[in-house]
Image (spheres, helix red, strand yellow):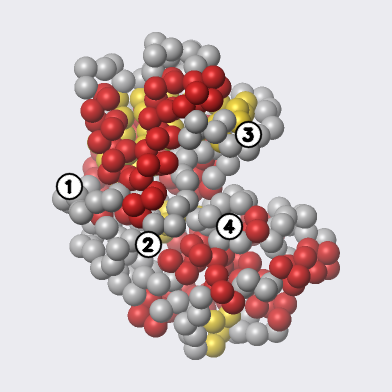
């Protein structure tokens, strides 16, 4: 169990992918725990403060990875949540495997106190991105036909861990929702910006996905909940060398949740209309810039708040999309969150940060 007493031995987290929705929220949570020091790594780096410092590194470059990371002998836990987008499933494998390998090969030889490596995965492990898959998906389900970088990453850790004193865990959330800018996979931001623009244009909020997707059974994972689960799995010996599905704990259908989201933005709904957000939102930069000025929003570029392609991906799931989360509960993790409340809380956070009107 987590030990947060002042006398607890200090732990140092290396959070890889520090500026993504998962990494950012993980750092925020770790910063609330008194016995952790935190190092965030990403291509852009960040502004260090308190117990959190940042390193900018191109993890695709093995030499730069060693140069930037090989001095971090104090690291006790690696939390790997980095991701590189590529056009095809096959093209995703080499860069995403290489970044993990480069991090481990830079840290493991110098960090004598390394205790755990945490790997962030997702339902691609179950083939959810390919089409209808077995639901509820379980951690014991068989692998599917490659390519799949999540599986390759886990196999790398399994092989690397043999004979070592450190352990690994793999976290498998559904769609992760929380605050982050410039992230290619941020559904909450997709919905918030889409709804805000619909309101500015005086039109109802239409569900843009496939007709069947409006009625499918889905689940989400709150980024804050995921952060707690990630630290739990990394520090509870019962979780060593295992994978865990991490979900909010409830299921929903868009046909029930969508009108509630519309009501939050004071919008009416209209019948769903299948359309590619990546296409229809391409010409909206001028509208966004005008909204930023009109409502005194933070000067975030249109590209930094746009994840339209990911929105199209999620809204295309005309099949059930959920996993069995009971393994984590049986092992001791009992946190949960209502998905409707999660979305509304995130939208409130966006407004407080002046990301949306």
Q: Is residue 335 above or below residue 201?
A: above
Q: Judge by depth and name the residue closer to the eye, 148 or 4.
A: 148
2 vs 1, front mark: 1
Viewer-nearest of labels 3 and 4? Answer: 3
**Mark pair 3, 1: CA separation:** 37 Å
Marks 3 and 4, the one that precedes in the sequence: 3
How dense is the environment of label 4, judged by Cα within 10 Å: few (below 14), some, or many (20 and up)?
Answer: some
> Sequence-wise, which precedes: disc 2 or disc 4?
2
Q: Is 45 positioned to the left or the right of 1 in the image?
A: right
> Marks 2 and 1, Cα distance to the nearest angstrom?
19 Å
Q: Residues within 10 Å of mark 1 (few under 14, many from 20)?
A: few
Along the horizontal axis of the image, is 323 left or right of 273?
left
Q: How many residues crowd around disc 3 within 10 Å: few (fewer than 14), some, or many (20 or more)?
A: some
Q: Position of residue 255 (x, y in %)?
A: 43, 79
Q: Are marks 3 and 4 in contact (CB under 8 Å)?
A: no
Q: Which residue position holds label 4?
A: 346
Q: CA distance from mark 4 to mark 1?
A: 32 Å
* Relative depth, front residue between 68 and 258: 68
Q: Which residue is mark 1?
A: 140
Res. 72 visible in picture = no
Between discs 2 and 3, the one toward the N terminus: 3
Question: Do callouts 2 and 4 mark residues in contact (Cβ within 8 Å)?
Answer: no
**Residue 45 numbered tag:** 3
Mark 4 or 1, nearer chain start: 1
Residue 173's spot in the image, x, y percent? 37, 50
Report which residue position mark 2 lands on. 219
Residue furthest bottom as drawn? 271
Above/below status of 206 relative to 109: below
Mark 2–mark 3 distance (CA, rounded to whole Å): 32 Å
Quarter of the image holding residue 261? bottom right
């Amino acid at each position: 169990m987590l030990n947060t007493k002042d006398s607890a031995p200090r732990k140092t987290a290396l959070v890889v992918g520090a500026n993504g929705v998962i990494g950012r929220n993980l750092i925020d949570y770790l910063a609330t725990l008194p016995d952790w020091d935190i190092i965030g790594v990403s291509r852009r780096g960040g502004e260090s403060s308190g117990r959190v410092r940042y390193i900018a590194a191109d993890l695709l470059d093995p030499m730069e990875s060693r140069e930037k990371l090989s001095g971090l002998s104090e690291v006790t836990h690696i939390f790997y949540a980095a991701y590189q987008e590529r056009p095809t499933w096959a093209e995703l494998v080499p860069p995403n495997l290489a970044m993990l390998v480069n991090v481990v090969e830079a840290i493991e030889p110098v960090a004598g106190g390394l205790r755990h490596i945490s790997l962030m995965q997702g339902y691609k492990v179950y083939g959810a991105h390919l089409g209808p898959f077995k639901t509820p998906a379980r951690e014991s389900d068989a692998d599917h036909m490659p390519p799949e970088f999540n599986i390759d990453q886990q196999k790398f850790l399994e092989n690397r861990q043999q004979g070592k004193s450190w352990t690994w865990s793999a976290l498998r959330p559904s769609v992760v929702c929380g605050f982050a800018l410039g992230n290619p996979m941020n559904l909450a931001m997709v919905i918030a910006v889409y709804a805000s623009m619909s309101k500015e244009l005086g039109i109802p909020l239409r569900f843009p996905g496939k007709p069947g997707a409006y009625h499918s059974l889905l689940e989400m994972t709150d980024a804050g909940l995921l952060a707690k689960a990630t630290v739990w799995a990394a520090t509870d010996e019962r979780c060593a060398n295992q994978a865990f599905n991490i979900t909010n704990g409830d299921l929903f259908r868009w046909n029930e949740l969508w009108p509630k989201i519309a009501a939050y933005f004071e919008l009416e709904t209209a019948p769903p209309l299948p359309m590619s957000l990546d296409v229809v939102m391409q010409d909206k930069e001028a509208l966004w810039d005008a909204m930023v000025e009109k409502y005194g929003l933070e000067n975030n570029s249109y590209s930094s708040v746009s994840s339209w392609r990911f929105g199209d991906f999620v809204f295309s799931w005309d099949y059930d999309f959920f996993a069995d989360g009971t393994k984590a509960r049986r092992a001791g993790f009992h946190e949960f969150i209502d998905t409707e409340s999660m979305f509304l809380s995130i939208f409130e956070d966006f407004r407080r940060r002046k990301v949306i009107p």
